[in-house]
């Protein structure tokens, strides 16, 4: 069983603005990130796009703000740590859960990486809101999903953007799909698979 999603390295990235859905729902203790595993898995995709002359806009949720702005769940709190970890200049797209988003595009020349603030500040994010997906899609030329941990969710920033933009798999997601495909193609049948995960 092969995936229909093309890998990001099949795309010509020069002067291409890529919206990347990552999982930055990171564990935090006393204001400091205590585990970087999810973050580290998407770094190769981010660096590949920048190295190829593309522009990066990162999208993720953080906690459960229930569809409204919560300063404690804003990526503004984590931005200095994320910037240090990436070793790239980062700028926050501070939308505060309000449309329109056109004004945010003016910031896209200010940094190597733009971090769209918490997607769950929008009440429509967890509902797969089409209007919200269309608005966010205007910030990019294509969409890259690189968050296997949320790829099962029918959320605007996961499945919704794929309806409006050419969609590609980041390296982390592609690795997960390849592992699943290899298992499905080589396993002896009949069989029963019990698949689970853990917060890491």
Image (cartoon, rainbow, N blue to C red):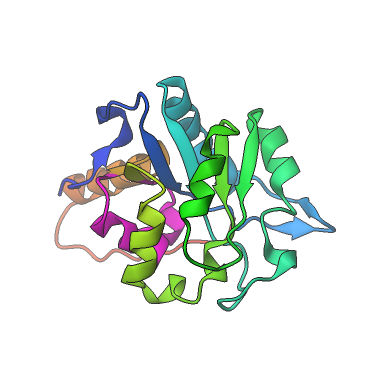
User: 8 or 19, which lies in front?
Assistant: 19
User: Residue 167, image x and y in percent?
Assistant: 27, 46
Instruction: Tell me the quadrant of the picture where the C terminus can be found.
Output: bottom right
User: Residue 127, image x and y in percent?
Assistant: 39, 77
Please determine whether, in this image, residue 71 is positioned above or below residue 77: below
User: 178 or 30, which lies in front?
Assistant: 30
Q: Quadrant of residue 174?
A: top left
User: Residue 60, image x and y in percent?
Assistant: 52, 56
User: 185 or 42, which lies in front?
Assistant: 42
Say left or right for 8 vs 109. Answer: left
Is residue 6 a member of the stretch shown in magenta? Answer: no
Which residues, given as a range, are shown in magenta? 144-167
The residue located at (47%, 37%) in the rendering is: 56
Q: Is residue 194 visible?
A: yes
Q: Is residue 153 visible?
A: no
User: 183 or 50, which lies in front?
Assistant: 50
Please determine whether, in this image, residue 192 is positioned above or below residue 84: below
Is residue 157 a member of the stretch shown in magenta? Answer: yes
User: Residue 92, image x and y in percent?
Assistant: 63, 47
The residue located at (74%, 57%) in the rendering is: 28
Q: Quadrant of residue 166?
A: top left
């Amino acid at each position: 069983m092969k995936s229909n999603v093309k890998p990001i390295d099949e795309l010509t990235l020069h002067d291409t603005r890529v919206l990347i859905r990552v999982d930055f729902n990171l564990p935090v203790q006393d204001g400091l990130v205590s585990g970087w595993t999810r973050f580290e898995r998407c770094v190769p995709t981010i660096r590949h796009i920048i190295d190829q002359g593309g522009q990066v806009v990162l999208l993720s949720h953080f906690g459960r703000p229930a569809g409204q702005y919560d300063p404690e769940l804003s990526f503004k709190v984590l931005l200095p740590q994320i910037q240090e970890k990436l070793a790239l200049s980062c700028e926050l797209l501070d939308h505060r859960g309000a449309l329109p988003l056109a004004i945010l595009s003016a910031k896209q020349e200010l940094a190597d990486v733009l971090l769209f603030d918490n997607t769950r500040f929008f009440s429509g994010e967890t509902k797969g809101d089409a209007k919200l997906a269309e608005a966010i899609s205007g910030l990019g030329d294509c969409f890259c999903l690189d968050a296997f941990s949320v790829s099962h969710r029918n959320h605007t920033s996961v499945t919704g953007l794929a309806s409006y933009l050419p969609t590609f798999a980041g390296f982390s997601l592609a690795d997960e799909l390849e592992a699943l495909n290899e298992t499905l193609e080589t396993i002896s049948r009949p069989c029963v698979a019990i698949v689970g995960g853990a917060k890491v």
